[in-house]
Image (spheres, rainbow, N blue to C red):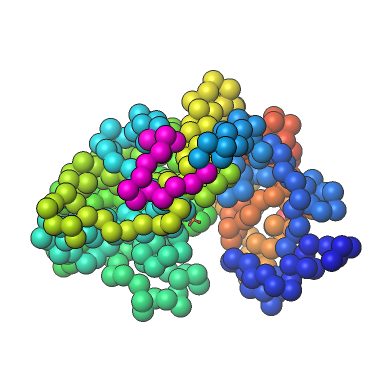
C-alpha cells in the first residue's frame, strides 16, 4: 500500500467518532507529535491549541512520562485488579488522596471519562439501594456533557448525540446552570424536583461546561445547589474529566466550592494523553455503605483494564510534573496572557462574550446565525490553514493549550484569532 496516503487508505475500513462520513472532509494523517506541535504526513506542522482534547497538558511525547511508562512496562505490564494490586496503583491512590478534596477517601479505577461517570452513577444508585432507600432519578445541569455510555448520556443535555437514545435513558431532571441572578428560581425548581421524585444523584461539570462551549458558571450558585442536594442525601457527582489537573487555576475546580462533592470523576489529563485511564473517587460514607456480610452489597462492576499499571505509571509521572515549579510558572504565564488577551478584544463588535479562567480561554462570536451550519467548519479551516488546531464548538472558539506551550506559540494563536476577527464581515 506504499504510495497511498493515510487518509485515502483510512477511507476503506475506518469509521471515525463524531463524524458524518457522507459530508465530512477526509481525516488528516498525523505522523509525529512533540511538545505543543504535531505534524501531518505531508510535513505540515500544527500547534495543538487544545492539547488534544485537553489531555496532553505536559506536551506530546513528554520524556518523563514516556520513561515512566517504559520502566513500568519492564517491571510489570499488566495484571487484573480483582484479587490483585500493584505498586503504581497503590502509589497513585496515595498521591491523589493528598491533593483531592479532603472528604474523598476511596478511589475506583476505570479506563475513560465516560466509564468514570458511569461508575459514579452506579455507585450513587447502589449506595441508596444498599441503605434500603430506593432512588431512581438523576439531577443534571442543562447542556452538560458527561460521556457516551448510557448513564453518562442520560446525565448529559439532550442533543443530536444522545437524542436517538432518549427513550432508553435513565430518568433525569435537568436544571438551568446557575448564573448569579437566577439562583432563587433554580433553587425552587430544585425543591420541586426533590419533592416529586426520589433523586439519587446530582451530576455536574464544576464551573466550566466543556462541550457546551466552555460556558462558565458561578461557584457560589453551584455551592447552593450542592448544599440543597446534600441536605436531602442526594449524592453530588463532580465530573472533573475536563477541569481536573490545573485547567481552572486550581488542581481541581471543586476546590472553588465550599460544599465538597461526594464523588469526583477524573480522566483526560490524568495520564497526559499517554494512556486511557480514569478514576472515580468517593467519600467514606459511600464506601462504607458497600460493606456488608452480604456479598451482593459490594460493587460488582469492573473493566478488564482497571488500574492498568502503565496508565498508573503515566499518571504518577504527570502528577510530579503538575506539582513542579516549571509547570506552575507556565500555568501562571498562560493565565496572565489569556487575561490580557481578553482585555485586548473585549467590546469587539464581532464578539458576543469573551472569558478566561486558568488556562481556558473562550470567545463566543457574534455572527449571523443563518450561516451557523458551516460556520464551525469554516472557523476550523481558517485556523488549520494557519497551522493551528482549534476545534470551535458552534460559534465558540476556545483555547486550552498544553502547559508547556512556548510564549511564541501562544501568541501566534492570539494573532490568528485577531486575524479572524479582522476578516469577519
Ligand atoms: C471528555 C469528557 C467526558 C468523557 O470522557 P471520554 O474519555 O471521552 O469517555 C466526560 N465528561 C467530561 C466533562 C468530558 O470533558
| Residue toward you, 154 or 269 | 269
What residue is shown at x 43% (from left), y 56% (from top)? 304
Classify residue 55 as left or right of residue 281: right
Residue 112 appears left or right of 70 = left
Question: Is residue 256 in view from this perspective?
Answer: no
Magenta stretch: dominant secondary structure: loop
Q: Residue at x 60, y 37 (%)?
A: 70
Indicate the position of residue 1 as horizontal and vertical percent values: 84, 66
Q: Which residues are magenta?
A: 77-90
> Quadrant location of residue 150?
bottom left
Question: Given the current orientation, which residue lies at the most extreme right position?
Answer: 3
Instruction: Give 349 or 174, whichever is nearer the viewer.
Output: 174
**Rendering coords of residue 40 (x, y %):** 79, 52
- Is 151 magenta? The answer is no
Q: Position of residue 73 (x, y in %)?
A: 56, 40
- The residue lying toward the viewer, choosing from 370 and 416, is 416
Amino acid at each position: 500500500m506504499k504510495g497511498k496516503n493515510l487518509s485515502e487508505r483510512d477511507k476503506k475500513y475506518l469509521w471515525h467518532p463524531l463524524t458524518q462520513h457522507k459530508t465530512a472532509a477526509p481525516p488528516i494523517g498525523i505522523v509525529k507529535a512533540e511538545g505543543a506541535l504535531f505534524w501531518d504526513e505531508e510535513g505540515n506542522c500544527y500547534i495543538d491549541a487544545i492539547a488534544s482534547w485537553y489531555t496532553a497538558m505536559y506536551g506530546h511525547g513528554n520524556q518523563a512520562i514516556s520513561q515512566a511508562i517504559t520502566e513500568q512496562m519492564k517491571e510489570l505490564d499488566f495484571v487484573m485488579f480483582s484479587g490483585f494490586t500493584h505498586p503504581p496503583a497503590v502509589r497513585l491512590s496515595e498521591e491523589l488522596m493528598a491533593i483531592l478534596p479532603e472528604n474523598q477517601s476511596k478511589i475506583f479505577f476505570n479506563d475513560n471519562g465516560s466509564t468514570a461517570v458511569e461508575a459514579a452513577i452506579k455507585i450513587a444508585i447502589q449506595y441508596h439501594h444498599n441503605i434500603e432507600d430506593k432512588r431512581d432519578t438523576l439531577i443534571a445541569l442543562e447542556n452538560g456533557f458527561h460521556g457516551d455510555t448510557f448513564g453518562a448520556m442520560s446525565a448529559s443535555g439532550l442533543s443530536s448525540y444522545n437524542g436517538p437514545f432518549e427513550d432508553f435513558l435513565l430518568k433525569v431532571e435537568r436544571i438551568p446552570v446557575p448564573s448569579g441572578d437566577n439562583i432563587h428560581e433554580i433553587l425552587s425548581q430544585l425543591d420541586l424536583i426533590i419533592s416529586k421524585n426520589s433523586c439519587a444523584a446530582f451530576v455536574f461539570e464544576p464551573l466550566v461546561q466543556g462541550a457546551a462551549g466552555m460556558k462558565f458558571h458561578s461557584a457560589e450558585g453551584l455551592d447552593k445547589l450542592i448544599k440543597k442536594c446534600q441536605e436531602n442525601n442526594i449524592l453530588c457527582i463532580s465530573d472533573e474529566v475536563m477541569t481536573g489537573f490545573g485547567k481552572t487555576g486550581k488542581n481541581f475546580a471543586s476546590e472553588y466550592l465550599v460544599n465538597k462533592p461526594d464523588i469526583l470523576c477524573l480522566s483526560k489529563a490524568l495520564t497526559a494523553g499517554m494512556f486511557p485511564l480514569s478514576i472515580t473517587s468517593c467519600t467514606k460514607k459511600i464506601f462504607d455503605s458497600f460493606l456488608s456480610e452480604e456479598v451482593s452489597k459490594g460493587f460488582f462492576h469492573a473493566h478488564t483494564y482497571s488500574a492498568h499499571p502503565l496508565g498508573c505509571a503515566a499518571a504518577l509521572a504527570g502528577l510530579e510534573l503538575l506539582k513542579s515549579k516549571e509547570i506552575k510558572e507556565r500555568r501562571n504565564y498562560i493565565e496572565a496572557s489569556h487575561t490580557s488577551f481578553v482585555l485586548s478584544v473585549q467590546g469587539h463588535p464581532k464578539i458576543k462574550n469573551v472569558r478566561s479562567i486558568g488556562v481556558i480561554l473562550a470567545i463566543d462570536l457574534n455572527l449571523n446565525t443563518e450561516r451557523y451550519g458551516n460556520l464551525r467548519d469554516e472557523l476550523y479551516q481558517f485556523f488549520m490553514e494557519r497551522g493551528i488546531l482549534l476545534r470551535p464548538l458552534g460559534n465558540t472558539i476556545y483555547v486550552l493549550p498544553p502547559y508547556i506551550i512556548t510564549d511564541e506559540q501562544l501568541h501566534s494563536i492570539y494573532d490568528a484569532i485577531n486575524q479572524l476577527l479582522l476578516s469577519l464581515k
